[in-house]
Amino acid sequence: MIVLGVALASLAIWLVLVFARDGFWLTRERDSLPPLPGREGAGVGWPNAGVDLSTGRPTPSPSLSGRGAAGDWPSVTAIVPARDEADVIARSIGSLAAQDYPGDFRIVLVDDSSSDGTADIARALGSERLSIVSGAPLAPGWTGKLWAVSQGIAAAGDAPDYLLLTDADIAHAPDTLRSLIARAVEDDRVLVSLMARLRCDSLAERALIPAFVWFFQMLYPFATVNRRGRGLGAAAGGVMLVERRALEAAGGIAAVRSALIDDCAFGALLKTQGAVWLGLTDRALSIRRYDSWGSVAAMISRSAYAQLGYSPLLLAGTTLGLALTYLAPPVLAIAARGPAQYAAIAAWALMALAFQPMLRFYRRSPLWGLLLPAIATFYAGCTLLSAWQHIRGRGGLWKGRVQADLAA
């Protein structure tokens, strides 16, 4: 009876995840697709734009594409915090400098005490759009990235209508900014954020990266985030276009200065000011390499325990919950018999099915769906590692800085 109870509980969990979690796993929230009929925001400017069937991308919204003079477009300043990013900064800043945006667009690179010539590499690009700020020493109570971002915002001043907060390891398609502005203006969003397509070349990346985005969507279903009104807010830190006045009204970047998971805190903050939008994209690519299992583990463990509020009780509950959700179905599908086995097989099948849209988005084999229990076990291990690092005073380690204690 215990085995049957565990199998039925696992199946119930997957029925809820698949049918009652706002369709998070369907990957329908993309900047290349209009909203589905009946989705929140349908009928507002942007969704009325057409879709180029040859590329799958939206055509410009009529009211924006009809603007001729550069001054008719909102002014934008991109803020790029960078700390020892010599291997990616040229491609990142170069892609920003090459934006085909008709309006006033400037780039502020904040060099956060880099020791590898990051600023010199960016300066050598010779872009008239680019200015470089030498970051001040880290202020108490701030995480390193947000302290750098705050200095970039201060350097931008009151001139821009929008701020594009983007990471130094993101390469942008030439139409990224135009697309972001179109959605923000025409769909009346104070924040538009893109989950950049992560690099997925090495074996470790192919095995683990699609699941990283999939788990994020499970925690923050994009359709729920994008629904107008109060409720769940979130963002993806690689690409966030924010209306400057809305950010100021929300208390500025200082309102989330100690948040280790700063993007989701930022999205929740901005949703108090208006509608936000978060979606998948092919326009923005993360070019940071995770060539080994250890490098992926380091990326996950940096903030996993922070997601649990540094709570040992939540850590224990999460570990047991992951075992019931992901490990029990394959184990019981193989070892159990009768109704328990059938329930476990059904749960495992639902699990594999729910992973398929994300695997297609990342162009990975559907067979990875059957391995989701092993992938989830790896993530559970990273969460335990994150807690262990926090206990040892090494939580939130990023490029020589330990930052988890700020929010603990």
Image (tube, rainbow, N blue to C red):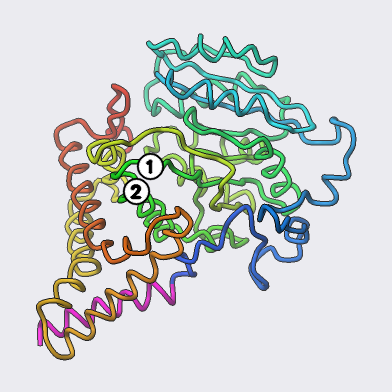
Q: Mark 2 or mark 1, which is nearer the start of the sequence?
A: 1
Instruction: Give the left or right position of residue 138, taking residue 102 as reference.
Output: left
Q: Which amino acid does label 1 sit on?
A: Asp
Q: In the image shown, does 391 or 59 lie closer to the viewer? A: 59
Instruction: Write down the region rendered in magenta.
Output: 1-20
**Main SS of residues in magenta:** helix
User: Which residue was labeled with disc 2?
Assistant: 206
Within 10 angstroms of label 1, few (less than 14), some, or many (20 or more) residues?
few
Within 10 angstroms of label 2, few (less than 14), some, or many (20 or more) residues?
some
Please determine whether, in this image, residue 275 is positioned above or below residue 262: below
Instruction: Give the left or right position of residue 115, taking residue 169 as reference.
Output: left
At x 32% / y 64%, what residue is drawn?
Answer: 367
Q: Do the residues labelled 1 and 2 touch (CB within 8 Å)?
A: yes
User: Which residue was labeled with disc 1?
Assistant: 201
Which part of the image, by quadrant, shows the N terminus?
Answer: bottom left
Which part of the image, by quadrant, shows the C terminus?
Answer: top left
